[in-house]
Image (tube, helix red, strand yellow):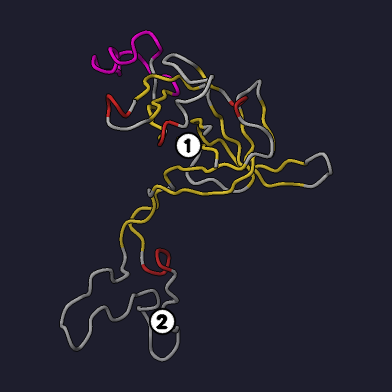
Amino acid sequence: MKFILGTKEEMTQIFDKEGVVHPVTIINAGPITITQIKENEKDGYDSVQVGFGERKEKNINKPLKGHFKDLGNFKFVKEFSAQGGSVLDGEQSPKTGDKMDVSIFEEGDNVVVSAISKGKGFQGVVKRHNFAGGPRSHGQKHSERKPGSIGSTGPQRVFKGTRMAGRMGTDRITVKNLKIVQIDKENNKLFVKGAVPGRRGTLIEVRSL
């Protein structure tokens, strides 16, 4: 399994060799550094922990400094599962301190992208759940976007799970089967076809299928 961390930049469009235009999202990916390898015998599960980005040393507490050692001052730390030891097996088994960049991927690879979606704050039912709202005629004046009845005559209570107004966004979203259209190895950029969740600067997790 191939994986990398990055930040979302922007959307644009690029042309392939056949002259076909593709809408793509630019991801500033890597390089990432392996900070720890967890094994089932010692930690209870198999995973690879990686660090990405940089931040000031004064903003890192002492336990993290001891954990990172001399590998760097990382802004983000994430773990990628190595279930069954698939990542840890083979001749090219990763080691602590190894670095990975966009060169591990190839153009045409299908990947899975995960990120935190944009936060939209407190929203009503029309925006949050696509309610149609009430008609603007027949005497309605101030209730066009109201949710309507939320109770029932029988059990005089509101059922759990009733769609109502509330916080919208800031959810972990995973999008599958996105295609890597182009790779810029010099600038560590991935051009992924389609939309990716999050705003500019959002941490993006890219994994191979």
Magenta region? 52-72
Location of residue 183 in the rendering, given as x and y in whole percent from the top left corner: 67, 31
Q: Is residue 100 above or below residue 17?
A: above
Q: Residue at x 26, y 78 (%)?
A: 150
Location of residue 143 in the rendering, given as x and y in whole percent from the top left corner: 35, 78
Which amino acid type is shown beneath numbered disc 1? Glu
Q: Is residue 177 above or below residue 101?
A: below
As for residue 68 lying within the magenta part, the answer is yes
The answer to which quarter of the image holds residue 135 is bottom left
Q: Residues within 10 Å of mark 1 (few under 14, many from 20)?
A: many
Can you identify the residue that label 2 sits on? Answer: 134
As for residue 175 lying within the magenta part, the answer is no
Q: Residues within 10 Å of mark 2 (few under 14, many from 20)?
A: some
The answer to which quarter of the image holds residue 179 is top right
Of all residues, the one furthest to the bottom in this rendering is 138
Q: Residue at x 56, y 30 (%)?
A: 28
